[in-house]
Image (cartoon, rainbow, N blue to C red):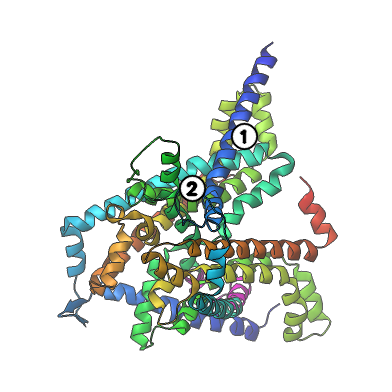
Amino acid sequence: MVFQMSGTTSTRRARLLTIYAALVFIFIYFPVIVLILYSFNRDGVGGFPPRHLTLDWYRQLFADASIWDAVENSLIVAAGSVVLALILGLLAALALDRANFPGKALFRRLVLLPLILPGIITGLSLLMFAVFAGAQPSLFTVFLGHGTALISVATTELFAGLQKMDRAQEEASLDLGATPWQTFWRITLPNLKLSLIASGLLIFTLSMDEIAVTFFLIGRDNTLPLEIWGRLRRGITPEINAVSSLIFAVSVGLILIWYRVRTRGLGAEARELLERP
Amino acid sequence: MYSRTYKTLVSIPPLLWVGLFLLLPYGLMFAHSFWAVHDGVLVHQWNLHNYSTLFSKPVYVEVLLRTMRIAASVTLFSLLLGYPLAYYLSFHGGARKELLYQLVIVPLWVSYLVRGYAWKTILGSEGVLNGFLQYLHLTHEPVAFLLNSPFAVVLVLTHIYTPFVFLPIYAALEHLPRPLVEASHDLGASSAQTFLRVILPLSIPGLLAGATFAFVLSLGDFLAPLLVGGASGTMIANVVQSLFGAALDWPLGAAISVCILLVIISLLFLTERLEKRWSFK
């Protein structure tokens, strides 16, 4: 009898929790769904219900030269940032993992600071530095800003990869007569492949999306988020919904690519470990 | 195992880069906060004037307090949404656990701007929500307080930071040894007792990490207020931004930034201590 009672209360509690979790999921996804829905709405971004579905906004978007210029700028900045942040992040991770130097603890905190601090502080500091160094704000300063701020992401991810790595392979390679340079290219780097791809994708996405730091470093040429930002101030049209929906689709596409890479790259052993409950 | 040359080669470039492009800029911010502006020109004259202005003018203190309130509300609501979600996934997720987990992560990859903008189209006086209310004849005039209010800022930031808060809590719950929960049940504790005396205390480090993240990032946000906050939703970072823009008083702006920085760093220090104290093992 007692067991039955506690059984019903616990199922009721579980049901309530399920409903609550479902509501949280709705809250998380509701804005994106509305956004996509209204990108097909002929009568603009507001009003209810959406009527007269149309692809006109997408047509307008594809004919909009300044949006595509901004996309190109963003792609260049993001690609550059990935290269810069991965190289410096890899070196920083190796240094933190293997070397000892005075101020190591300070260095680690400093590298991670842009990840923890609000973008406005990093953005303004870099702006002051640009003025101090006599550099004109441009896509180049934006690239330096993104690349530098995102070293934090690369370092965290690659440091974790190094910690998980089997040291015996490197030792064996060195014992068998390979130079440290050969060992780095043939053992260390291949072992970090997954961490490199993961952090590269993450850095790319974060750079494509960055506003807070970009806001202060931008010159005449806009990145995509800044172009959208500028248009928002002039009023909103479903064209912005259309471009936002495409950004959403690309983000989801990148995540799917990352999954393919991850499941393919892992050995059967690791996969089994992952799938074990 | 690694030679001296190897260690030097990997350490020098990142050290130099970080010194030049992070330490120096943050240092410049700090230095600016002690300088002054005379007739629109920056003067390198060391003084504490900016800080005394900051604490003597009620407008700055008022905005700072409002910012703290907004950040605290965002933290609270993100926890109220994120914790039960993490608990549900960890203890009742079953076979769909991995899929549901990914569903929470996806929005993290989706543009901040896209999500903020989506809320703007929903909350506006000619927005989706007002259209819906009028469609149902619940209201006849658009409800104005939805957009351009502190409420809108809290809503948007909560939406953005809930997945961030979820992550560390979920990780903490996943690492929680299940035999402890079973032992608690076997020894006669009720579900509520088990939660309050076993699960909750052991998930405190994750909860603290998530809460700190939400609070710190909300504290320095200036985009959500610009997007949906209106005049009554102005936050401290907007003041900084206008001092660097139209008002052109970099030293005062830098002084406010340094204050934000100090609040954040002391908070991080505090939670790091607390996390250590509460951590299992």
Residue at the (59%, 76%) spot, across then down: A82
B32 left or right, relative to B159: left
Kindly report which numbered mark, 1 or 2, lies closer to the viewer in this rendering: 1
Q: CA distance from mark 1 to mark 2?
A: 24 Å
Q: Out of B66 and A155, give the one closest to the viewer.
A: B66
The quarter of the displayed image where residue B269 is located: bottom left
Whole-percent x and y of residue B153? 38, 51
Asked if marks 1 and 2 fall on the same chain, the answer is no
Q: Position of residue A172 (x, y in %)?
A: 81, 76
Q: Tag 1: residue type?
A: Thr
Indicate left or right for A80 with A172 as reference: left
Residue B208, disc: 2
Is A230 or B215 nearer to us in this picture? A230
Mark 1 residue crowding within 10 angstroms, few (<14) / some (14–19) / many (20+): some
Residue bounds of the magenta highlight:
A89-111
Question: For residue B183: magenta?
Answer: no
Callout 2: residue from which chain? B
In which quarter of the view is residue B264 placed? bottom left
To which chain does the residue with label 1 belong?
A
Asked if disc 1 and disc 2 are in contact, CB closer than 8 Å, the reply is no
Q: Secondary structure at mark 1?
A: helix
The answer to whether residue A93 is magenta is: yes
Q: Secondary structure at mark 2?
A: helix
Q: Residue at x 79, y 53 (%)?
A: A273
Q: Quadrant of the C terminus of chain B?
A: top right
Whether residue A28 is visible to the viewer of this picture, yes or no, is: yes
- The amino acid beneath tag 2 is Leu
Q: Which mark is residue B155?
A: none
> Residue B41, image x and y in percent?
20, 82
For label 1, the residue is: A18
Q: Main secondary structure of the magenta part?
A: helix
